[in-house]
Amino acid sequence: MSIVSTRLSAAERREQLLTVALKVFAQRGYHSTSMNDVADAAGVTKPVLYQHFASKRALYTATLEAVGDSMIAALQSATKSSPSGKEQTASGMVAYFRWVANDPDGFSLLFGGGTRRDEEFAAVAQKVEKAAAELIAPLIEAGVDSGYQRMVAHALIGMSEGVVRHLISNGQPIDPDTVGEQLASLAWAGLRAVGRRPA
C-alpha cells in the first residue's frame, strides 16, 4: 500500500506562509507580530519559516508584494476583454471593489498607515500603486498626453481607496458591483471632460 505524501513543495509552502502572514500582520500589525506568531499560526517551526524568509521585514515585504500582485492581476483580468474605455473603466472599478471585499486584510495591509509610516514598506506600496496607474492610464481615452493620463489614473486609485476607507469607517458593507458601477459612472463622466478647455 502506497503512502501519499502530504508534504508541500517549497513553492506551496511559501504560498501558505504568505497567506498566514497576511492574516496575522493584518490583525496584529507589523510591530506586534513575531516570527513565532506566524510560524505558530501556520503550524510550522520557526526554522521552517526562516528557510523561506530571512527576517520579519523580508516576510512583511514579500506579503505586501503578494497582495499587490493579487490586486494587479484582478484589474488586468477584468479590463483585458472589455471592448471600450467606458466598459473597461466599469470593469476595473468593479474588479477593484471585489478584490477589496474578498481580501480586506490585503487592503488593510497595503493601504494601512503602518505600511505607509515605514520607508521601505511604503516604497513597496507605492510601486504597487504605480503599477496600477500604469495599467489604468492607457484606458483613459481622452486625447491627452501620457503624463496627464497617469495623473488621472492616480486620481482614480485615490478616489477608490477613499471610498473603501469611508465604508469601512462607517461599518458599511462593501457591495462591489453596486459601488464599482456607481464610482465608474462618476469616473467616466469626469473622464469625458478630461482635456476639454473650460468655456
Image (cartoon, rainbow, N blue to C red):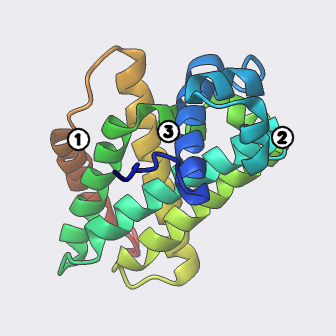
- Of the numbered discs 3 and 1, the one sitting upstream in the chain is 3
Residue at (50% x, 63% y) in the render: 132
Q: Residue at x 46, y 61 (%)?
A: 72
Amino acid on which disc 1 is placed: Pro
Foreground: disc 1 or disc 2 = 2
Element assignment for label 2:
loop
In the image, taking residue 93 as reference, residue 32 lies left or right, namely right
Category of crowding for the residue at label 2, using alpha-carbon neighbours closer than 10 angstroms: few (below 14), some (14–19), many (at least 20): few
Q: Secondary structure at mark 3?
A: helix
Q: Residue at x 37, y 69 (%)?
A: 76
C-alpha gap between disc 2 and disc 3: 20 Å
Disc 1 residue crowd, few under 14, some 14–19, many 20+, Cα 10 Å:
some
* 80 or 155: nearer the viewer: 80
Height in image: 142 above or below 155? Answer: below
Q: Residue at x 39, y 22 (%)?
A: 168
Which amino acid, by three-letter code, is at mark 3?
Gly
Quadrant for residue 195, please give it: bottom left
Query: Which dot marks residue 106?
Result: 3
Q: Nearer the viewer, mark 3 or mark 1?
A: 3
